[in-house]
Image (spheres, rainbow, N blue to C red):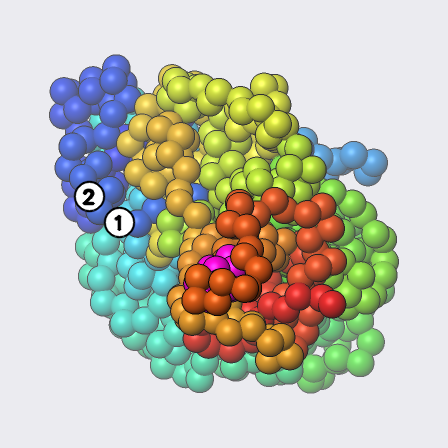
Amino acid sequence: MNTKAFLRDVVFTAVGLCEEKLEFSAAFIKNVLVKMNYSQKAVSGSMKKKIQISYVIRDEVEPRHRSGVNSMQFDSSLQRLYTAGRDSVIRIWNSRLDRDPYIGSMEHHTDWVNDVLLCCNGRHLISASSDTTVKVWNAHKGFCMSTLRTHKDYVKALAYAKDKEQVASAGLDRSIFLWDVNTLTALTASNNTITTSSLNGSKDSIYSLAMNPSGTVIVSGSAEKVLRVWDPRTCQKSMKLRGHTDVVKAIVISRDGTHCVSAGSDASIRLWHLGMQRSIGTIWCHTEGVWSLQTDDSFSTVYSAGRDKCVFMSNLKCTENSVLLFEEQAPVLKLLLVDHGTSIWSSTTDSSVRLWKISAESLDNDYDVDGCNADMPLVRKPEYVIKGAPSIRQYSILNDKRFILTRDSEDNIALWDVLRARKAKDFGCQNFEQKLKEQFKMLFVPNWFSVDLKTGMLQITLDEADCFSAWVSAKDAKLGNINNVDVKLNFGGLLLQALLEHWPRAQSVQDQPEEGTGFDKRFSNGYFAVPGHTPLIFCETSGRALFRLACRDAGGENESALLNDVLPQWAIDIVVNKAMPKYNKIPFYLFPHPSFNLKVYKRDRLSASDMLQVRKVIEHVYEKILSTAVSTENSMNAANSEKNPGAQSQPSSTPAVLPSNLEEKIELYCQDQRLDPNMDLRTIKYFIWKQGGDLVLYYKAVK
C-alpha cells in the first residue's frame, strides 16, 4: 500500500469529517504519522459497535468486471476509459487496444462503486461507493490518495464543476456535501485543514446529482420524486420542481445553468426551465425506468437509456422527435458520450462495456422522422466490446458447511472451499439442482458464516454470534488425521487464524502439535492457509467498512497497528490467545427399545457434545446400562443364594471389556430408524428427530 495514501486514509478513518470545518492539530497528525494509532475517542467509539470480519474468494488479479458497471469516465488525452464496477473495483482500459485493453485496477472500496468523476484535467479521479465513502485517487498511477467518511449511508452520486474544481457528493443519507478538489489532493501532514459545506433540506434518499461547470447551480433527484435546486455558493435552496411520479435517477444541467433535463423510474424524461421553475417538455420514448442521460455540448440533444435496454436520442428543441440508436443486452446503467458525440460507451447490469459508433449522416436522416421511431435501431452492433467475466448468481452451502456450490451468469457450476478461500472444482455447464443432489451428505454442521453475492463474487462474513458454532471431527472435515474421529476442529477458529497468520501478534504464541492430530507445521493453524491476496474487510454490522487489506499485508507496520485497534476481542481471543471455544452440548434421553425386554429404574437426562457419534453412545449403553443390569441381576441372585443355600452362587462382576464387534450386538434407534454408528447427535436431531424438545434415542441388544 502507498504510504502517503495510507496515512491520509488513516487520518480520515480515525476522525471522519464534520459538516463545516475540521482542523487536525499538529500533535494529532504527529501521533498518526509516528505511532499510527487512532485517537482515543475514535477508538472507544468504534469499539462499542459490533464488528464483522469478511473476506472475498477471488483470483489475485481480476482483469475483468464480475458484475454490472455503474459509471464510466473517459480521458480523451490518454484515451483511457475508467469503469466503476459493482464488484467494488475501478478498472482502467486503453481504448486504443483491441486485444488486451486492461491497464490496471484501483482497489480500495469494499462495496459497489456507484459513480466516478475525472477532475484536474484527468490527473485525479473521485469515486463514490455503497461502502459509504468517497475516495480521491491518483488517476495516472492508480492509487488511493484519501478517503472521506462523512456520509453515513450509500453514496450514490457525484457532480463536478470543472471551472471551479469543485465536487459534490450525495446519497441515501439525504446529505449533499461540497468538496474543493485542490484541497483534497493537496492534503499533507502540514497542510491538514479541510473545508466542506453541506446542502440541507432533502427529505428522502438522493439518487442523482448534477452541477454546471461554473458551479452556480446544483440539482438533486431523490425518492421524494422531486428535483431540488441549490446555489452552491451560498448553500441556499433555490426551488423545488415537481413532475416526476417516481424516483429521479438521472440529471444533466446546461452549461449556463438555465435548463436541466431529468429522468426517472416513471419512464419519463423532463426538460426544465430553471428560471421559470417549471417543466417545458416531456419525452415518452421509453417503456420502463430511465437510469442514465447524456447531452451534447449545445444542450440540444439528449441520449437516454435504462431498464428497457433501449438507447434513444431525442431532440430537446422538439421533444416529440426521438430515434432508437441501439439496443443493449441488459438494462443500461450508464451512457458516456465521447469523440464529439460520434461514439457512446454503454454499461449495463452485465459485466461487459460496449462502444457504439454513430454516423452523423444517419442521425440527420432519422431526425426527419416525426415522433418516436422505436421500430428499428439505427446501429445494429457495437464497434468494440470490453468483455466482462461471469458473476455468481446462485449459491447453496453444502451440509458440511465447508463447501459452497455456485451457478454463475453463464450457467457454469463450481465448488468453492470456504476454509481455503479458493475454488475447489469446476463442473462446467450442468443442472444446478442435480449437481446439488449429488453433493448431498447425511451430515449436519451448524451455520457459522453468511454469504453475500453483491459483488458477483463470494463474500464470506464471520460474526461473533455464530462464528464458532461449527465443531467438526477431523474425519468429517477431511483435515489432518482423518482416521482419528476424536480430533475435533473448529471451522471458524481455524479460518480466523489462517486469515490473520501474517499479523505479528498472531505469531506470538505457537500451538504445540499433538500426537495423532495430523498437525502440519507449515501452517499457522496446523491444517491449511488462505491465498495471501485474499481481501480482508472489517466492517460494522450496519455494513459500514472500517478497514480493508490483503491477508499478506497484515504484517506491515501500518496495517498491524490498525489491526490492533480494529480487530474485535472475540477474534483476538482465538488468533492471539489461541483460546478455542467450548464444544456445543446437546441433551438427550436414552431408553430401551419397546421390543427389548429390559427394566430400567433410572430415566436420566443425558448431555454430551453434539458431535458425539452413535458408536460412542453404543459403548455407553454396553458399559453403563447393559453391564450394570447384568451386575444388578447377579447381586440379586447372590442375595437369593444366601436365603436359599442350595442355589448356585454367581461370581462378582468385573469391569466390562468392549467386544470388537459391539456395533453388531447393540443397535440404536430414533423415530424407528436404525442409526448409523458414524452418525453424530446433531445430525440425528436435524435429519431424523426433526422436532423440538430433547432428543430421544432407543437401544436394544441384537439376538
Callout 1, which amino acid? Answer: Lys
Give the image location of residue 629, x and y in percent. 52, 63
| Residue 632 in magenta stretch | yes
Residue at figure coordinates x 37%, y 34% from the top left: 579
Label 2 sits on a secondary structure element that is: helix
**Picture residue at 78% right of the left edge, 45% below the top:** 425
Do the numbered discs 2 and 1 sit on residues whose CB atoms are within 8 Å?
Answer: yes
Q: Which of the 4 image quadrants contains residue 689?
A: bottom right
The location of residue 383, given as percent across then percent down, is 81, 51
Q: Nearer the viewer, residue 685 or 128?
A: 685
Residue 464 on the magenta segment: no
What residue is rendered at 25% in x and 25% in y? 37
Q: Which residue is mark 1?
A: 49
In the rendered image, the residue lying farthest to the top is: 34
Drawn side of residue 482 relative to residue 15, left or right: right
Q: Residue at 35% of width from left, 28% of height from top?
A: 577
Residue 45, numbered circle: 2
Q: Residue furthest front?
A: 646
Residue range of the region highlighted in magenta in the rendering: 630-641
Disc 1 is placed on an element classified as loop
Q: Is residue 689 left or right of residue 273?
A: right
Q: Quadrant where the C terminus lies?
A: bottom right
| Residue 572 rendering spot, x and y as whole percentages | 35, 33
State the image quarter where residue 646 is shown. Answer: bottom right
- From what the image shows, is residue 597 above or below residue 171? below
